[in-house]
Image (tube, rainbow, N blue to C red):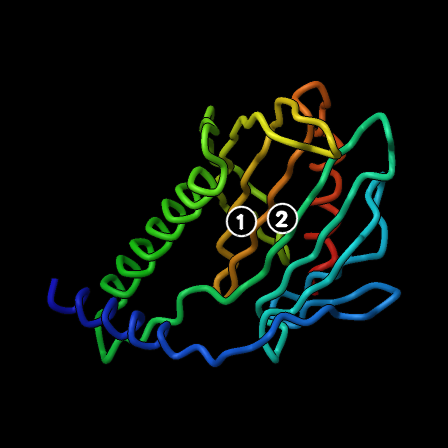
Amino acid sequence: MKHLFIVLLAFMIAGCITPSYKPQNIEVGGAYTQVGTGITFPPSSGIFRRVQLVSFNQQASHMYVGYNSELIAQPITVSAYVYPGPAISSFGSPPEVIATARQKLWSDHQEQQKQEILLAHPGGQLIAESAVTLPYRGQSVSGLRVDYEFQEPFQGEVQKINSTLYLFDLGDNILKFRVSSPISVDSEAPVAKLMAELMNTAS
């Protein structure tokens, strides 16, 4: 327990040192490769068109990529986020203690992300939660899928919305997807195709 406390404390202290940075649009017309993950975000994929690239720090290790469906009859928005994962300083702690600390941080992060969505969407409901996987650099990466339902404006009309959170721990980085569409729209196949194509670009 002492080792675990030291590991967690070191992470929390390191996490507090965040220089201020004004988010910047990344102006690029073609494909963009995120350095930390090796994932390439193309200007278009399937029914989706890339609409924005934003960097939240100088190195673009924390960034956002937005995709919108180009089909009027199938409106879907996909937001992808990449940001650094827990950087644990162990001070000589045993490997099993480090693994336990990392799992604790990952679990806490998942809960934080889930609750932040509900806080941002009053009246929203968490309706399902499940484990998912994605291919990444020749391996199968485990992740979390959480499904929500909202009643709110979407493309100028108040309606029932399906919104899904995906979280994947890529080791040094975390990959997050937010997918939203009207409840009448089936987004499963096109979104799964987009996510798979993005992950298959990782070098």
Classify mark 1: residues with Cα within 10 Å, few (<14), some (14-19) or many (20+).
some
Using the image, determine if residue 77 lies above or below residue 198: above
Residue tagged 2: 135
Badge 1 or badge 2: first in the primary sequence? 2
Disc number at residue 67? Answer: none
Tell me which amino acid carries mark 2. Pro
Residue 112 falls left or right of residue 67? left
Circles 1 and 2, Cβ within 8 Å, touching? The answer is: yes
Q: Residue furthest left?
A: 2
Of 151 and 181, the residue lying toward us: 151
Disc number at residue 141? Answer: 1
| Quadrant showing the C terminus | bottom right
Residue 13 falls left or right of residue 170? left
Total count of labels: 2
Residue ID at (80%, 28%): 74
Q: Secondary structure at mark 2?
A: strand
Residue 107 falls left or right of residue 175? left
Residue 30 falls left or right of residue 61? right
Distance of mark 1 from mark 2, alpha carbons?
A: 6 Å
Q: Residue 29 appears at what percent x and percent y?
A: 88, 65
Of 180 and 203, the residue lying toward us: 180
Q: Residue 23 appears at what percent x and percent y?
A: 62, 70
Of 198 and 138, the residue lying toward us: 198
Tell me which amino acid carries mark 1. Val
Q: Residue 153 appears at what percent x and percent y?
A: 65, 32
Classify mark 2: residues with Cα within 10 Å, few (<14), some (14-19) or many (20+).
some
Residue ID at (24%, 70%): 7
Quadrant of residue 151 within the rendered picture: top right
Q: Residue furthest top?
A: 184
